[in-house]
Image (tube, rainbow, N blue to C red):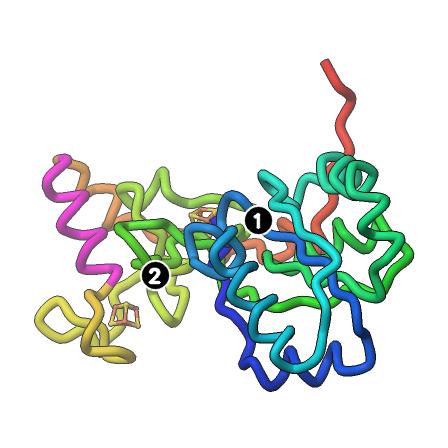
Amino acid sequence: MIITKQKPLEDIIEMVAKYKHLFYVGCGQCSTQCQTGGEWEIEELSRLLEEEGHRTSGSTVVYAPCHELDTKRHFRKHKEQLARTDAVIVMSCGAGVQSAVEGTDLPVFPSNDSLFLGNSQRHMHFEEKCSTCGECVLQWTGGICPVTRCPKGLLNGPCGGTNHGKCEVDSDRPCAWTLIYERLESLGELDMFRKIQPPKNYAAVKRPGLMREEVR
Ligand code: SF4
Ligand code: SF4
């Protein structure tokens, strides 16, 4: 899921200052889990902005606003409310905000900052474990990603700084390469650890990412 945090309220107030009637789009998936774009957060933000003199023309929670067709469908469904709207606030990741831009000619504003692709471990505990590098190496590393979880992104580790299983960059975190060693050892696959891996092809995925495949 995409991890988000809400922008400071004063920034949101400033970005919509000249728009009276606001329509809110929430996200039923990632941003609901991050508490940045569910029903409750929409209610809270609209209440705070009403205290600043704004009016709420309506709101909707799209299951996953990164789904452009679904987001457009929500805009069609709420077209009467949107006809009375001056600006749209999207409470999702940046992908959802840009879906909304495809679905309306109204000004669209983000209430959140998008942080990373995160694993959800428990309520409001998220950890980045994959940074979508385009050329996965988990087959060599016991399923633990050194590209993301080692701050240096080493493909052959550990570095000289690993300290009793902790990372030298952040001693609160485990050294990813120690985790890889322990995992491969438990799997009886330490030969994999001894193999020198070639340099990574960082051009494996071009940004911005794009995939256009024939539907089967
Ligand atoms: S190597 Fe790491 S960053 Fe790349 S795709 Fe695999 S898990 Fe994701
Ligand atoms: S201590 Fe481990 S995780 Fe930290 S930078 Fe070195 S190899 Fe990477």
Q: Where does ligand 2 appear, by image quarter?
A: bottom left
Kindly identify which residue carries mark 1: 27
Asked if ligand 2 lies within 8 A of label 2, the reply is yes
Q: Where 144 sits versus 116, above or below?
A: above
The image shows residue 24 at horizontal and vertical percentages of 67, 57
Which of 90 and 49 lies nearest the eye of the viewer? 49
**Range covered by the magenta-colored residues:** 176-187
Q: SS for tag 2? A: helix
* Between 37 and 215, the one nearer to me in the picture: 37
Give the alpha-carbon distance from disc 2 to disc 1, as whole Å: 28 Å
Residue at the image point whose x is 21% and y is 42% from the top? 191
| Amino acid type, residue under disc 1 in the picture | Cys
Magenta residues, dominant SS class: helix
Instruction: Name the side, left or right, on which 202 lies relative to 103.
Output: left
Residue that label 2 marks? 149
Picture quadrant where residue 160 is located: bottom left
